[in-house]
Amino acid sequence: MDSIRQYQQILYKLLQTHAHKPSHGDIKPEIVVDRDEKHYELMHVGWQGAQRVHGCVLHIDIVGDKIWIQHDGTHLGVASELVEAGIPPEKIILGFRPEHVRQYTGYGVG
């Protein structure tokens, strides 16, 4: 299996792992995947009382042969989970970090 296909499977499983209903409000997790363009997102959608909730929890893209974490709203961060799943750290880019900081993260720089 080529690495891109493997990455796609890992990312989908990761989204499923994090797609749990929040403990408050009438909020549902939504997994949004565009396999052709290689975009993977987990959203929270619903209501908390009279307040509308519509927000991104995770946004990860495959760009070239690298995984770009564009947004990570999880408590512990998903980069280490990706490494545990078999993705080399240098193939993971913390896109939500400024470019000049990435060299110090232990992950890829872009």
Image (tube, rainbow, N blue to C red):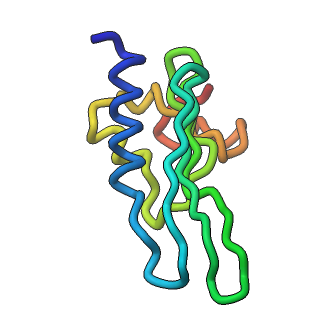
Q: Name the side, left or right, on which 12 lies relative to 52.
A: left
**Most foreground residue, 90 or 60:** 60
Report x, y in % for residue 91: 46, 26
**Most foreground residue, 67 or 54:** 54
Q: How many numbered marks have been drawn onto this rendered protein structure?
A: 0
Q: Residue furthest bottom?
A: 49
Seen at 43% across and 45% down, the residue is: 79
Quadrant where the N terminus sits is top left
Report x, y in % for residue 29: 49, 61
Quadrant where the C terminus sits is top right
Hey, which quadrant is residue 10 in on the image? top left
Report x, y in % for residue 28: 50, 66
Seen at 66% across and 62% down, the residue is: 55
Seen at 27% across and 37% down, the residue is: 85
Residue 77 lies, with reference to residue 23, above or below; the image says above
Residue 17 lies, with reference to residue 69, above or below; the image says below
Residue 51 lies, with reference to residue 5, above or below; the image says below
Q: Residue furthest top?
A: 2
Seen at 65% across and 89% down, the residue is: 49
Residue 12 lies, with reference to residue 55, above or below; the image says above
Report x, y in % for residue 73: 56, 60
Q: Name the side, left or right, on which 23 lies relative to 33.
A: left
Q: Name the side, left or right, on which 96 lies relative to 8.
A: right
**Most foreground residue, 98 or 37:** 37
